[in-house]
Amino acid sequence: MKVNCELIQQGAEARIYFLDYIGFPAVWKERFVKTYRHPQLDERLTKSRMKAEVKAINHLKNKSAFLSKSMPTILGVSDSSIIMTRIENAATFHEAISSEFFSLQDLFQRVGMVIAEVHKCGLVHGDLTTTNFMVKNDVSAIVPIDFGLSSFSTTPEDRAVDLYVLERSLLTSGRDDSDLFSNFLLDKYKKEMESIGISVANAIVSKLDEVRARGRKRDMVG
Ligand SMILES: Nc1ncnc2c1ncn2[C@@H]1O[C@H](COP(=O)(O)OP(=O)(O)OP(=O)(O)O)[C@@H](O)[C@H]1O
Ligand SMILES: [Mg+2]
């Protein structure tokens, strides 16, 4: 397919283009061939990531009254590409954190709420980094993206790992956001998860402590 499009990002796994798709501002995410991988394995991984991404986005669109409107609409899919509607007037959570435009406490609380919503819909994200949320400039919505590693799971372990990955991703920003993470993001997340059961929320938070301890041990061993 060749249409008028602009390369926005070349990552390790995918190229992102902005394009106009029959009048809609859209994003074309193309997972390219990785020559360092065995061709059959590469093809299998690419297909499974595309499938996981489409399934998760559609699931949240159908299942979550809270996220449904802001999630992108899938416009087209192939084995290696997805075209979806563009989230406009938005920055990544990573960018939003260093912008003085946003109230950080509010931002972190809202992100906690979004993660709880994803988890309450039965999904875990699998790669919850700060570049995988889009924040609308007027903060009317925070949209999780990049669901290629997502899966359907409700275990405290998988949910805690999502939180841990985000906590680690915040650390690499070079700022100390641990207070914002614990007192706003995690606090809000926990309150939201308590709506399905206090024991459910408590189990995730104690799992997070275990996952953190495992991480520290791994860091020490190197
Ligand atoms: N629907 C969308 N609307 C607007 N921007 C988007 C959309 N999807 C992706 N982007 C932009 O493209 C970037 C990369 O997209 P995505 O995270 O899906 O791919 P990726 O290759 O896995 O990237 P990364 O390696 O940074 O995680 C996002 O951080 C965001 O800036
Ligand atoms: Mg990403």
Image (spheres, grey):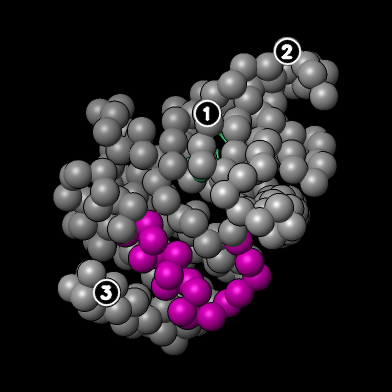
Residues at circles 2 and 1 in contact by the CB criterion of under 8 Å: no
Specify few, some or many for label 3: CA neighbours under 10 Å numbering under 14, 14-19, or 20 or more. Answer: few
* Image quarter in which the C terminus is found: bottom left
Q: In this view, does 18 lie above or below 192?
A: above
Whether residue 112 is visible here, answered yes or no, is: yes
| Element under disc 1 | strand
What distance separates the C-alpha of mark 2 from that of mark 1? Answer: 16 Å
Which mark sits nearer the N-terminus, 3 or 2? 2
In the picture as drawn, the residue positioned furthest to the top comes out as 4
Residue drawn 67% across the image and 42% down it = 33
Amino acid under disc 3 = Arg
- Residue ID for mark 3: 218
Residue 155 horizontal side relative to residue 6, left or right = left
* Image quarter in which the N terminus is found: top right
Residue drawn 45% across the image and 65% down it = 162
- The one nearer the camera, 97 or 65, is 97
Amino acid under disc 2 = Asn
Q: Residue 4, labelled with which disc?
A: 2
Any atom of ligand 1 within 8 Å of the CB at mark 1? Answer: yes
Q: Quadrant of ligand 1?
A: top right
Magenta stretch: residue 155 in it? Answer: yes
Specify few, some or many for label 1: CA neighbours under 10 Å numbering under 14, 14-19, or 20 or more. Answer: few
- The one nearer the camera, 132 or 68, is 132
Magenta segment range? 150-167
| Image x and y of residue 151, in percent | 63, 66
| Image x and y of residue 186, in percent | 33, 64
- Residue ID for mark 1: 9
Whether residue 55 is visible here, answered yes or no, is: no
Magenta stretch: residue 203 in it? Answer: no
| Element under disc 2 | loop
